[in-house]
Image: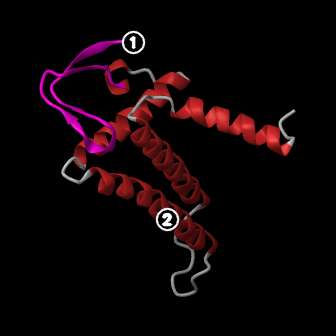
Amino acid sequence: MTWGYVPSVVLPFGQHRGPGKSLRRASVRETGDMDSMSGISRGISDLSEWIDEANSQLPPEAATWARLAKITEEAGEVVAAHIGATGQNPRKGVTHTRADVEEELLDVALTALAALEHLRGHDARSLDLLAARLEATLRRAGAGG
C-alpha cells in the first residue's frame, strides 16, 4: 500500500483534520489497482471521500442524511428507467433500454456502498462487509450450496 502526505483529510461525518495532520493511502486512481476486490473497495472509499470533501460545508448530520437520501433518489431513477424501457407511459413511449435499467441499478449499489464507507470513516472495507452480508443471507436462506 502506498502512503503519502495529504494537506487536509475528511474524517467521518465531515470532521476535518488540518494541514499536515494526516497521512493517507494513495487513491486507486493514483495506483491504478482496480483489478482486485481491495482495489475496488479503495475506489469506493476514494469516491466517498471525494463526495465528503465536496459537501464539507454541510453540518455532519446533514451530510449523512444527504448521503442516505441519495440512495433513495437513485432507486427512483431505476424505476423511471424501467418505466421508460417498458413504455409504460403512453405519452412518452419507450425512452430507455434494459441497459439503462442495469446502469441505474449499479448506481444504487455504488451509492449505497459509498454511503457505507462514509459511515465507517472510509476504511475501504465495503466489499468485505458486503461479502459477509451475502454469506449470512445465503446461510439464512439455505441457498448457495
Way the structure is coloured: secondary structure
Q: Residue furthest bottom?
A: 91
Q: Is residue 37 magenta?
A: no
Which of the two discs, 2 and 1, sits closer to the camera?
1
The stretch in magenta equals 1-27
Tell me where residue 117 appears, x and y as whole percent.
43, 38
The image quadrant where one finds the N terminus is top left
Instruction: Say which amino acid is labelled 1.
Output: Met
- Residue sitting at 47 percent across and 60 percent down? 74
Q: In the displayed structure, would residue 31 be above or below residue 133?
A: above
Q: Is residue 9 magenta?
A: yes
Secondary structure under the numbered disc 1 in the rendered image = loop
Which residue is the site of mark 1? 1
Which residue is the site of mark 2? 77
Q: In the displayed structure, does residue 84 sit left or right of residue 62?
A: right
Q: In the displayed structure, would residue 30 be above or below residue 49?
A: above
Instruction: Say which amino acid is labelled 2.
Output: Glu
Who is closer to the viewer here, 140 or 112? Answer: 140
